[in-house]
Image: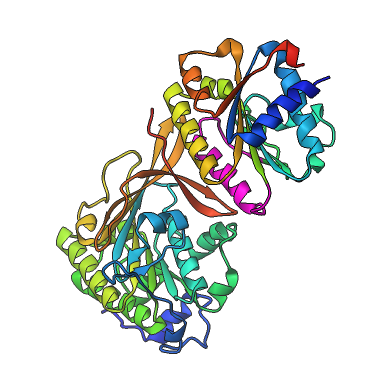
Amino acid sequence: MLDGLKERIFKAAKIHQSIGIIVPMNNYSDLSEAMFSYMLDDNADIWIYLMITKSYDTMMKRFNGLAEHKNIKFIDCISRAAGITRNDKGCVYIDSPVMLEKMIIEIMHIFHECKPDVSKYLILDSISALMIYNNPETVKEFFQHLINKSRAENMHSISIVLEEELNEYMNRIIFLNDKIIKVKESFI
Amino acid sequence: MKKKLPIVLYLVITYHVPTTQKKGNRRDMQETEVRSSGQVEKCTIGIEELDTQLNGGIPTGSTVLVVGSSGSGKTTLCMQYLINGAKKGERGVFFTITEPLFKLTKNIEGFKFYDKKLVETGMVNLIDLRIISERLGLDAEKYTVEDASALLDVLRDIAEELDVKRLVMDSITALCYRLQTREMIRDFIFKLGTSLAAMKCTTLLTSEVPPRTFKYSQYEIEEFISDGIIFLGDVERRGDLIRTLQIVKMRGTSHSRTKFAMNISTDRGIELLPLLKSE
């Protein structure tokens, strides 16, 4: 059912270094499902899921067997701030979603640990959520750093923005990507 | 009457100093780095990003002030510097005045970069300076000119006897507190730095300052005698504190003055990334 969405996103992600996805709130869970479905089927590439919208625990409960996939790594930026102190092997916990530099350090560390010949993908979920915790200018600067680092490290990035929360800042950020995909009902 | 201790006694009060350690048998193990830019010998800290910002490392023989408030990462940075040096064959010594050795080792044991064998084999020597002072019969609170001179001799003797290339004093603030005048502080640091530089020993002195201050030292003398200043601070972002590192001064090398966000993890020690500027 979500094949159309999956195909559009991952075809674009393979071709372009960075893609931005603008998704209506109603379709956020479809997008999430499409992405996880793709990642779970893909054992060849390395994936990092930067979680600012939902916690690792939530994702684990929603997608069975996620923890067994060694090629998918999670960076959870919201659990610690919410007072959740669990530790999991497949997840790096960051104390607070304002620690943007630490996010980049952890992303780069995970990718540097990988074999150089594998394709590397980063999913930033989401820029809208980052904006809740940070100054918009800081998020923009963070994103610029991230895009530049991604290019330097030959890593692909997929960043999500909620359509309803698009504002002047988010527009400026999302359009830094090489390709923008607007999720529509017709894709799904 | 102050006693001058034989060197063997200094060694007894160190932590895990092996009996096989003799001066002169380890020069071959040393790795000094001569950089093409002006042929300045550099001493690498072993933290990649920091060495890059220092254009290859600290000029060998320099005395560098590592400034920061409590919890800023001064001791971790210094310990990582010593351990990384020892791993490539450069012997080091860590003089502590602020905390007992058992506490220091307990804290540092949690880091993956820490290798107990380096301490056991004497590549890294941990010495409690308070015990040395006590055995020298020095006043615990205030040092006279003679006391300071005796202590200086001991420090030089230890550095020479162990043939160390890296020395850490944690903290110079606690030591300066015992020196009674600004002149004594200036004289002590100057003489210590000069003798160690002659031994090609690169020294890190930790300097304690209150949080969020633009001071590099408690007595405002230390920074003028030092060759370099590495400032560890923090910035507040929406209530959370982010550790920062900035190289303020480093004689003998070009260096960046950018402020970095500093991450300390038990797995990887200190890591740096340029601090985001927009606030």
Q: Position of residue B248 (x, y in %)?
A: 28, 50
Quick one: which residue is furthest to the left in this view?
B183
Left or right: A182 in relation to A170:
right
Nearest the eye: A8 or A169: A8
Residue B7: give x, y in percent of width and height. 38, 85
**Residue at the (48%, 39%) spot, across then down:** A148
From this view, report whether residue B81 is shown above or below residue A122: below
- In this picture, which residue range is highlighted in magenta? A92-118
Q: Residue at x 74, y 19 (%)?
A: A29
Q: Quadrant of residue B145?
A: bottom left
Left or right of residue A99: residue B147: left
Residue B131: horizontal and vertical position, in percent? 41, 71
Quadrant in the rendering for residue B210:
top left
Q: Toward the viewer: A9 or B134?
A: A9
Q: Is residue B47 magenta?
A: no
Q: Is residue A95 magenta?
A: yes
Furthest residue to the front?
Answer: A15
Closer to us: A104 or A30: A30
Query: How many numbered marks does the figure carry?
Result: 0
Asked if one can make out residue B217 in the rendered structure from this viewpoint, the answer is yes
State the residue at coordinates (59%, 70%).
Answer: B116
Q: Report x, y in % for residue B134.
A: 37, 71
The N terminus of chain B lies in quadrant = bottom left
Compared to B252, does A108 lie above or below? above
Q: Residue at x 52, y 88 (%)?
A: B20
Colouring rule applied to residues: rainbow
Residue B238 in sight here: no
Residue A77, quarter of the rendered image: top right
Of residue B10 and residue B123, the one placed in the foreground of this image is B123
